[in-house]
């Protein structure tokens, strides 16, 4: 039985945060592998402040960036969930789906499994029409999650993140979208991912 505002998947519990999560969260935020595509690693104080902000958001709205437990394996591996970008861009206001996991838990499909459940929550419980996700072009692991859950990229939607300096290599971002009517697909085959990339590039060049 899950508590209200929690989500159970085959292997995961997306749950409210607790005090014991702060330490492993700080450890993953201090790991250069995890923070490779962000401006810097976080100090303990920055990490705690972020956890508090996320926790307050979840409590207030009943949805957000859930703490992720791998049931019977690890009490806290990171976060997966929904958030509201706090900057202006051509696609905002919007709701994004996002994830950050400790590196020792990569390569097991947890991000994909949790993200699919978060998308379903966005469409079926919150009734949203569209969910976006974005990252720097080089964040291939994250882009693969977006593609595996059936999100699609139109190159015409690529944008400069206003929170990054004009000369920062982290300024340019790719945007992926998922629309409610598209359904949540299980795109796991490489051929299907290549096919989608091809269709997106044809659409972009036809503009
Ligand atoms: C982005 C991030 C969550 C992706 O982690 P990940 O482990 O690559 O993604 P998943 O959990 O979906 O796992 C997919 C991998 O597990 C493998 N896998 C193993 N068992 C699997 C299963 N049951 N189901 C699906 N995939 C499985 C897949 O083959 C894939 O491996 P591959 O990429 O080598 O082909 C992780 O790299 C991360 O936290 N990065 C730092 C933070 C970050 O950049 N966040 C995004 C900002 S936009």
Image: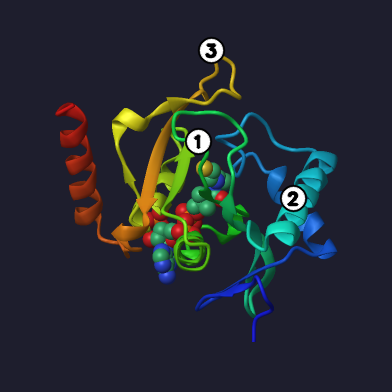
- Tell me the crowding category of disc 1: few under 14, some 14 to 19, or many 20 or more residues within 10 angstroms, Cα based: few
Vertical arrangement, residue 169 with respect to residue 77, above or below: above
Q: Secondary structure at mark 3?
A: loop
Mark 2, residue position: 27
User: 74 above or below 98?
Assistant: below
The residue that appears at 45% across and 66% down in the rendered structure is 120
| Of pointers 1 and 2, the one earlier in the residue sequence | 2
Side of 204 where 171 appears, left or right: right
The span from disc 2 to disc 3 (Cα, nearest Å) is 29 Å
**Identity of the residue drawn at 23% across and 43% down:** 197
Residue linked to disc 3: 167
Return the x and y of residue 173 as percentages of the image width and height: 45, 30
| C-alpha span from label 1 to label 2 | 31 Å
The quarter of the displayed image where residue 150 is located? bottom left
Marks 1/2 in contact by CB < 8 Å: the verdict is no
Q: Which of the colour schemes (rainbow, by chain, secondary structure, one colour) is used?
A: rainbow
Question: Residue 37 in the image: x percent, y percent?
Answer: 55, 35
Residue occupied by mark 1: 92
């Amino acid at each position: 039985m899950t508590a209200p505002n929690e989500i159970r998947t085959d292997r995961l519990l997306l749950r409210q945060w607790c005090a014991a999560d702060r330490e492993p969260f700080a450890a993953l935020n201090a790991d250069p592998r995890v923070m490779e595509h962000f401006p810097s690693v976080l100090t303990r104080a920055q990490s705690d402040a972020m956890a508090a902000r996320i926790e307050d958001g979840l409590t207030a709205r009943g949805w957000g960036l859930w703490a992720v437990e791998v049931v019977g394996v690890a009490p806290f591996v990171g976060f997966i969930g929904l958030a509201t970008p706090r900057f202006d861009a051509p696609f905002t206001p919007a709701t994004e789906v996002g994830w950050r996991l400790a590196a020792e838990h990569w390569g097991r499909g947890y991000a994909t499994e949790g993200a699919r459940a978060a998308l379903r929550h966005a469409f079926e419980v919150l009734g949203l029409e569209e969910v976006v996700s974005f990252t720097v072009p080089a964040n291939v692991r994250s882009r693969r999650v977006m593609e595996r859950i059936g999100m699609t990229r139109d190159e015409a939607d690529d944008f400069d993140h206003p929170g990054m300096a004009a000369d920062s290599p982290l300024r340019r971002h790719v945007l992926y979208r998922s629309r409610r009517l598209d359904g949540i697909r299980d795109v796991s085959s490489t051929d299907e991912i290549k096919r989608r990339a091809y269709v997106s590039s044809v659409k972009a060049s036809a503009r």
